[in-house]
Image (cartoon, coloured by chain):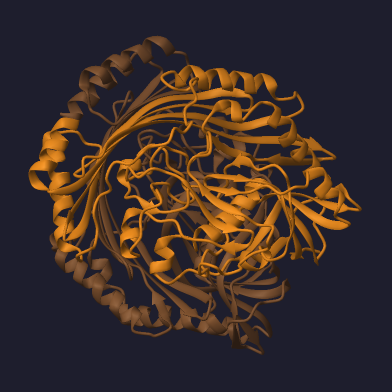
Chain colours: A orange, B brown
Amino acid sequence: MKEELINYTKKLAKDYDIYLQSTEINEIQLQKNKINFTNKAFDSGYGVRILKGGLGFSASNVKSEENIHKTVIDSLKSAEITEKVKFRFPEKGRYPEVKTIDKKIRNKGGEAVKEYSEKLINGIPEDVLLSFGKIRSYDSVTNIINSEGLEVKREDTNFMVELSLIVKKNNKRMEFWPHEYRRRMQDIPMSHIDKWVKLAYDQTIAKEPKTEKTRVVFSPSVVLDGLGSVIGGHVTGSAKVNEVNKFSVGDKVASPKLTIISDGLYAYGLMSGEFDDEGVPQRKVPLIVDGVFKGFVYDQFYAMKDNTESTGNGLKQSGVFFSFEGKYGAQPGNQVSNFYVKSGKVSYDDMIKDIQSGVLVEQFSWLNPDVTTGKFSSEIRAGYYIREGEIKEPIKGGLVIGNIFDMIKRIDCISDKSMICSGGTVFAGICPYISFEDVQIAGK
Amino acid sequence: MIRDLMEKIVDILGDTYYGDVRYDSGESTGVGKSKSEESISTGSANGLCIRVISDNKWYYLGFDTIDKKRILDETEKLVRRVGKKKSKIWLQDPWEIEKVLPVKEDPDDIPLEKRMETVREMHKRIMENKKIINSNVGIGNSRTETIFMNTEGTKLSQVLPYFKFIMTATSKEGKNLENDYFVLAKQGGYELLGEVDIDKKIDEIVGNAVAMLDAKQIKGGRYDIIIDPEISGVVAHESFGHGLEADQAMRDRSYLAPLKGKGIISELVSIHDNPSMKGERGFVFFDDEGIKSRDNILVDKGVLKQFMHDRQSCVLMDSEPTGNARAQDFARKVFVRMTNTYISPGDWKLQELIEETKSGYYLIKNLTGMEDPLGGNMQMITGRAMEIKDGELTGLFKGVGIAGKVLEFLSDVDAVTRDFQVRGSGCGKGREDYVSVSSGGPYMRVRNAVIG
């Protein structure tokens, strides 16, 4: 199949790239502490980009010769119809070594998922209902070949856990609902369950917060969804070329405490890889350093539009509905790799100790700010009051209302540990806890 | 050839308590333009999903490559491994249909060049306003075929056409950015584009995007509000509907589970989930378990009537399947999902509703919504708002969040209009398993709602 696809593309097109990906998916689902579903699925396919005046694209997972030919012809036709672009496919680069594989998942995902599921069932405390659980592994191989002589291969593993943990206390039933992605199973250890169960129990006594302006601390995954979605939308070459960016290079856009990097090399980062989805080496790109905006991330298309070079940020991760398999069906998009917020100098404990009065948000129902304006208004699903330097009574409900662009100028403190995290809006980050001053809470 | 293979698979599955096989295939085309980019993308895909139930556990195999020998070997291995243990699952008499949902104008008959030119013209029109700095315009269509067979002897096939049209406008003044959009997502052909008054819609989104640059912020609190059909639909789907998916009840994860048969919200509110609503994005002739689609009244005049079911949940909850079993694709689980979910229209007219409201806000368009099936809390962000003073719409405000308990919110509905719209979109359960749906309803007035 691969040979026919390459030969036929070469026959019809002078400038092209071909993206092939195959993925084995293994999954177990749990209901009320028991396995009720197992699945093994295979997904493989190809996407073809052809440059002929415009840049065309077509993709398929159908491997018949007839369909391979149709896919290549469709790509060529779309290149001929769309407007002429300044573009060339990238040449082979010098690729760094990046850790992306869990050996437990590679080639034996089924066993690994079963083992993890059994551990999970045995590790859930008796007083907690594991209402449902999804445990899934992805084991992928990706090849990119283009007309500039680039031919690269990458192996990836990914792992997902989604759980609903329900507890009952004081005649109240409450849930904590984690949904985490990592490269390796060991990065979602059983010890996380203790924290999740505590968060669920604390919600049984949680009260709605009062309306006030106060200091608010975001957990790492909340930082990722809040800052990652908004800042990520304004630091791409695409945003710059389309003039929808709020930042210009050299602008002081945030507190001097804030440094953010698009880090494609972070060990076991979810977006890490030797190269992006166009075959360009991934790298670390400083976005904001000490509060000052430093530069944009580019894919090949927007780099050429803006007379610069790709930074290895042509990536095929979709927003909201994250994708692992089936990436061949999408074109590379200009996006941030792992959203890495550099840690501060104060431990999390000391950060809390310094807060006289405030709110800690561990989880929102869904933090999905308006990327264009930075505004958000989200319901607290699990949080706490902070009083006189201590975590106090749990809170739930009420809205946190703010604007990310304003909040990053009012950072009070950043904790000293950035950790790999995944969000509900932004897929991949390495983030710390951050406290912000004067944030509006709308509650009782 | 694929049907022959499926029949052989069903023969092998005959040694199980229940088994089925589903083949999905489809083709899609998208034509789009932004300020910096024109794109035409096409795609095709297929996949085969084999399911077996034994001892109340489901076992699946998913294949993207139709390799007959491998598929039959893996199926035989699976059947030998799981055996024929009895399971609590709905079984019914076999039935057969072959259906194609017709289109009046096949998008594939419109040359790509012409579709591209149409998109360029719309983009140009939107960009004529000097405050608009970017716009995305896209026209997309797809055609999917599903073939289903099971050990009951059922043999079904359906072909469904999808059409999507989207226009966005982004305005800018200094560093202040705003936007607005129009989207149409239904089942049908290119004729759907002809039914849109394009010039009027362009004027609306451009006007709104520019006007929003000067919009003020609402002070959070409790107000009387009027919500538009888009927001009514999201309340019906996200805040309410997810709690009526029976798998959530079976997991002890639905706040609505103990309330069946009870009056739970305003008697002015009735809620349906209707997979048989032809032309809407969640329409199917049959679901992914081979159950015929039908209109399901979930709430009738405030009284909770039923949950949505698949073959397994309906037996465990002493009910019937409702045509709501759906999967994202061949590689994912089939489970209870919504289709076309809406609140039924009432008697009022929108203008009457505004005139009869002394003070409050009229909320327009929905940006995001998230479910909370256990807690019944609402989490929604709306697009923009207008203040109502003495029965008249006055100033323009930026979008706000709606919070609170959905049962309280829907109990406080005191007026429902006959004006009614349904809008196509997509739904994930949690953060994955995307399926095509629609949601909608009338304009509704809600007293003393929490917004901010």
- State the count of labels: 0
**A327 relative to B79, above or below:** below
B346 or B197: nearer the viewer: B197
Q: Residue furthest right?
A: A388
The location of residue A413, given as percent across then percent down, is 75, 55
Residue at figure coordinates x 55%, y 39% from the top left: B246
Q: Residue furthest front?
A: A94
The location of residue B322, given as percent across then percent down, is 45, 42
Quadrant of the frame with the N terminus of chain B: top left
The location of residue A175, given as percent across then percent down, is 70, 40
Q: Residue furthest left?
A: A11
Residue at figure coordinates x 55%, y 51% from the top left: A261
B175 or B24: nearer the viewer: B175
Task: Please indicate, yes or no, whether residue A426 appears anywhere in the rendered image.
Answer: no
**A323 relative to B22, above or below:** below
Residue B180 in the figure: left or right of residue A292: left
> Residue B326's image quarter?
top left
B444 or B27: nearer the viewer: B27
**A20 relative to A245, above or below:** above
Residue at figure coordinates x 51%, y 84% from the top left: B211
Quadrant of the frame with the C terminus of chain B: bottom right
Residue A266 in the figure: left or right of residue B284: right
**B317 relative to A397, above or below:** above
Residue A288 in the figure: left or right of residue A364: left
A246 or B436: nearer the viewer: A246
Task: Please indicate, yes or no, whether residue A340 appears anywhere in the rendered image.
Answer: yes
The location of residue B136, given as percent across then percent down, is 35, 68
